[in-house]
Amino acid sequence: MDEEYDVIVLGTGLKECILSGLLSVDGLNVLHMDRNDYYGGESTSLNLNQLWKRFRGDDKPPEHLGASKEYNVDMIPKFMMANGKLVRVLIHTDVTKYLNFKAVDGSFVYNKGKIFKVPATDVEALKSPLMGLFEKRRARKFFIYVQDYEEKDPKSHEKLDLNNVKARDLILKYGLEDNTVDFIGHALALHIDDSYLEEPAMDTVKRMKLYAESLARFQGGSPYIYPLYGLGELPQAFARLSAVYGGTYMLNKPECKVEFDESGIAYGVTSEGETARCKKVVCDPSYLSDKVKKVGRVARAICIMSHPIPNTSDSHSVQVILPQKQVGRKSDMYLFCCSYAHNVAPKGKYIAFVSTEAETDNPEVELKSGIELLGPVEEIFYDMYDRYEPVNDHNADNCFISTSYDATTHFESTVEDVIAIYSKITGKVLDLSVDLSAACATAEE
């Protein structure tokens, strides 16, 4: 391999594929390699035989579950906010032409021992059984403030500087109860713990506005969309995109060893005795394990069912967020459910995930409060995986390492990481001001 590349990307996980797509579109010469013979890395999709082999050690699932090839079980399932950053990246790179999306039916929150639809506007707040009569009125006023808030229009600020006012103080101004604060912070603003309460309120208000705008987008029951046939379609779509812009993909490349010069700067990648030279290396944590640290673990259960999650209005696809306080934990728990409606399972079958940041070594016990909400489960697989973050200085070694996927079942945190790495590599801010109508999704018929 005589050619020198601008960037070599190792691993075809979602983050790496998005980055190679973005960098290719920017005109950089990209070589993308993976030691596996399939796309997706940690975030791959499995058919039923592969799922059985991975978790049960054989590839002979029971016949009553249907044809193996009709299953596309995402190992890191996440929904996309309809107007969120990932959708903007997909439009910016024109990957949307390779994908078909469908709106997700429901967005719910676990509160006081029950599942409720997440109210996102003043009108929904007034109808929601989540709150008593007086609380509804207070919540409605808060929602109206958020809906009317315009950063450039001081009249809408009510004399509050949201860059300086803490989220906690803004919420206190409206006198909202703890349970209400819980669903607003965790199920609407999608914060993963309560630390946001001490941060400036601007971020929370922007997140709530994004939720409401995404909800209005497809007039469905949720602000989320999801690709038909699951997320496994995304890495392949970005691979096609990269190829259009001259990027090179190589799967099934064993070893993939990053080469460093005597001053510790990465200059290439060796596989099968050949070294491809490059200026920068992008990879997931598994390729440079000495430059990352373990920061946590995710516990999860993968369930196959023949019914939707109870109390979610028979939704074929749904996210339920269990805020940490509601389940007596330090971190939130997430339920994700998808079905044959998104072509990820045979007709009549549903795939549900329960995930959380692990606090013990026992996923069965830890995930119990989420699994109990699923109703009868035909098959269940428990799993734990470690989460890593880079500890290297990319200015010193030219290595750009993504963080592992967290327990959330939405993409907001994933895309933040991608955009940050993109800016470090290019020195540019990614322009995500795009025409959102370029990504369409079908709502439930």
Image (cartoon, rainbow, N blue to C red):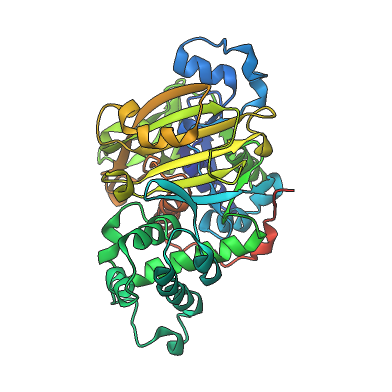
Q: Nearer the viewer, residue 292 or 51?
A: 51
Residue 245, x across and y down, in percent: 64, 47
**In this rendering, position of residue 389 left or right of residue 300:** left
Q: Residue at x 53, y 58 (%)?
A: 84
**In this rendering, position of residue 105 left or right of residue 108:** right
Q: Residue at x 42, y 33 (%)?
A: 372
Q: Is residue 52 visible?
A: yes
How many marks can you see?
0
Residue 207: quarter of image? bottom left
Residue 246, x across and y down, in percent: 63, 44
Residue 395, x across and y down, in percent: 30, 52
Q: Nearer the viewer, residue 435 or 63?
A: 63
Q: Nearer the viewer, residue 105 or 248?
A: 105
**In this rendering, position of residue 221 left or right of residue 347:** left
Q: Is residue 130 above or below residue 79?
A: below
Q: Nearer the viewer, residue 107 or 439?
A: 107
Residue 261, x across and y down, in percent: 30, 37
Residue found farthest to the right: 445
Residue found farthest to the bottom: 155
Q: Residue at x 55, y 19 (%)?
A: 50
Q: Residue at x 43, y 88 (%)?
A: 154
Q: Is residue 246 visible?
A: no
